[in-house]
Amino acid sequence: GIQVEQSPPDLILQEGANSTLRCNFSDSVNNLQWFHQNPWGQLINLFYIPSGTKQNGRLSATTVATERYSLLYISSSQTTDSGVYFCAVVSNFGNEKLTFGTGTRLTIIP
Amino acid sequence: NAGVTQTPKFQVLKTGQSMTLQCAQDMNHEYMSWYRQDPGMGLRLIHYSVGAGITDQGEVPNGYNVSRSTTEDFPLRLLSAAPSQTSVYFCASSYSESGTISYEQYFGPGTRLTVT
């Protein structure tokens, strides 16, 4: 099945810093989502972005489907940005399931 | 809209007990699914359904049963709980066309299950 790799696995930043999280996938996809899992365990939808670029406040995401990667940008980090960020994809081939990467754990230090 | 709801939020079971995790959505989504999340890992698909009366196995189906009698509800049954089923369980739903899920998925708040 499709492989999803996220990097870096862990990231520790000072409040106010910017960061870039990467998601690589091994097949073409028709669905790609970014989620934030907060310290209470809730999964929050950030972006539905199978291709192109989207922005929502301090967050933006870009997916280059032809090169099989997606980037999540977080600017001016706040402590509330801490948590785990997951990328998840649905392959164009094979059964219909959302496959998750193992996540990037982001810790923002005040 | 309440979105995707799950009950209970927390549950402790003894080995061999059975229980049902409830999941409901009010968005008229055809596609529903169950995932489990273990420490330090992403989510893994247990079972999914592309519509009422249709279910299929995901990546880790053993030990779990599902049924889909209505569009709104998709319960997950543990017939004989084992410690290996200690996990956090998430239900999700999305719009679907002809069984494909190339649309945004929405997740419930999760059920934290401990089997002793």
Image: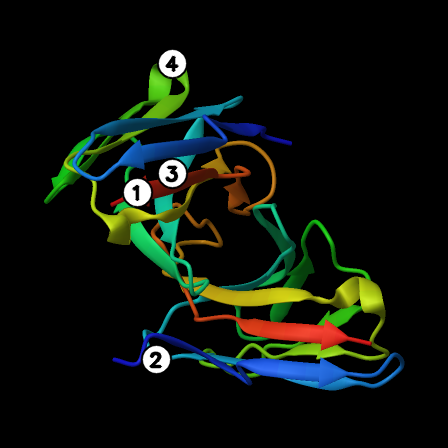
Check disc 4 and report the residue beneath it.
A67
Q: Quadrant of the C terminus of chain B?
A: bottom right
Work out whether disc 4 and disc 2 sit on a shared chain: no
Residue holding disc 1: A109
Chain to which the residue tagged by mark 3 belongs: A
- The alpha-carbon separation of the residues under discs 3 and 2 comes to 23 Å
Chain of the residue where label 4 is placed in the rendered structure: A
When asked about the image quadrant of residue A44, the answer is: bottom left
The residue to which callout 3 is attached is A32
Query: What numbered label is drawn on residue B113?
Result: none
Front position among marks 3 and 1: 1
Label 3 – label 4 distance at C-alpha: 14 Å
Q: Earlier in the sequence, mark 4 or mark 1?
A: 4
Instruction: Please indicate whether residue A65 sits to the left or right of residue B7 in the image.
Output: left
Give the farthest residue toward the right. B16
| Distance (Cα) linking label 3 and label 1 | 29 Å
Q: Position of residue B107 (x, y in %)?
A: 42, 64
Q: Which-is-in-front pick, marks 4 and 1?
A: 1
| A47 in relation to A51, above or below | below
